[in-house]
Image (spheres, grey):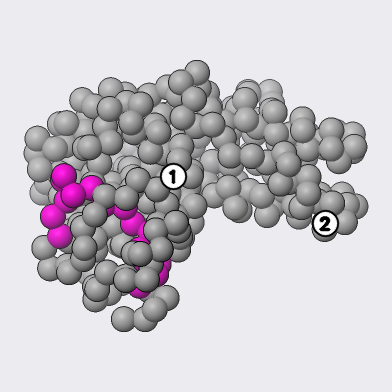
Amino acid sequence: MSRLFSRRFACVLFNPQTSSTPGVTISCRFITTSIKSNQELINSPPEISYQPFYSQKTQRDKKASLVIFDKDGTLICFHSMWVPWTLQTARKIEELAKIGSLSEKVYRLLGYCPIEMKVRPGLLAEGTMLQIREEITKLLIEQGLRKDQAQEIVSTSVLDCPTHSRKSLKPIHDLRELFSALKSHNVKIAICTADNRVGTMAMLREFGVESLVDVVVCGDDYGAQPKPNPYNALMICKVLGIAPEDTLMVGDTLADMGMGRSAKLRGTVGVLSGVAGKEELKPLADHLVSHVGELMPIVLGSSTC
Ligand SMILES: [Mg+2]
């Protein structure tokens, strides 16, 4: 196994209360911070053989064994968190750059519509914070700023969103009820999000579902790959010892659907509770539902939608 793969694999977080890993030799441990800071595990990576591709086999009438959820727009309201962040960030960038109407360019870059006051599919909805910072830096350079000036403005103004703030955190469905239902059918639960680990774990604790989630992969985890790259989905399957063809991906963007398709998972479920509409998700979604509250029949293989 290559060193690169070993280190990348170490980004996945385990919950030993709920995880079993048949066929996988790995030291199962619960890590509450990014693996980046867990030097011990990085120095002693888990042993695992890697098989990146599986044969796709669609069996809609068979129960899924694993559901991978996106977070923002899928489990919690995207707009109540990210609209205030967008307005504040764009205002700060314009103020520091001293360029008139720069906010509008930042909105366009991020995919925010100031008329609807909603985020549309695009960089903010689908990218990691690292990608967002890189793109805003490029925008500032295009506006005539030197690279060092642009980087200084970005580091000062493009801060992590306080996604664990009670004020902005609104669940789309009763997450404890949904996750408990999945567990009662012996279905494993993973979360794969572009958001950072601090906010993600705080959100899970806030809703009392941390112990029900088997694996969490975040955008700032060491070695994590942005969606629609299949890497994170395949790693989650491998860690939990579940084949991709027994796994469903649930999300609100084309990047979520793309990850599910490129990892050759059994199916993709598009939710209309986030940033993308029916027509946008349709090309890559095997199922479309209003929100995750309608998920169980699909997981259990009893849905025709
Ligand atoms: Mg999302």
Q: Find numbered disc 1 in the image and state the secondary structure of the residue it sits on.
A: helix
Q: Find numbered disc 2 in the image and state the secondary structure of the residue it sits on.
A: helix
Position of residue 302 measured from the top left corner of the image (x, y, whole percent): 12, 38
Quarter residue 3 falls in = bottom left
- Residue with the most extreme bottom position: 1
How many labels were placed on the picture? Answer: 2
Instruction: For residue 253, say whether it is visible.
Output: no
What residue sits right under mark 1 in the picture? 197
Confirm or deny contact between disc 2 and disc 1 (CB under 8 A): no
- Residue with the most extreme top position: 167
Q: Residues within 10 Å of mark 1 (few under 14, many from 20)?
A: many
Quarter residue 209 falls in = top left
What residue sits right under mark 2 in the picture? 148
Question: Main structural element of the magenta stretch: helix, strand or loop?
Answer: loop
Q: CA distance from mark 2 to mark 1?
A: 28 Å
Using the image as rendered, state which of residue 122 and residue 45 is in the foreground.
45
Position of residue 88 measured from the top left corner of the image (x, y, whole percent): 70, 28
Query: What's drawn in magenta, residue-wise?
Result: 6-21
Specify whether residue 10 is painted magenta.
yes
- The residue under the point 57% across, 35% down is 161
Amino acid under disc 2: Asp
Position of residue 156 measured from the top left corner of the image (x, y, whole percent): 73, 41
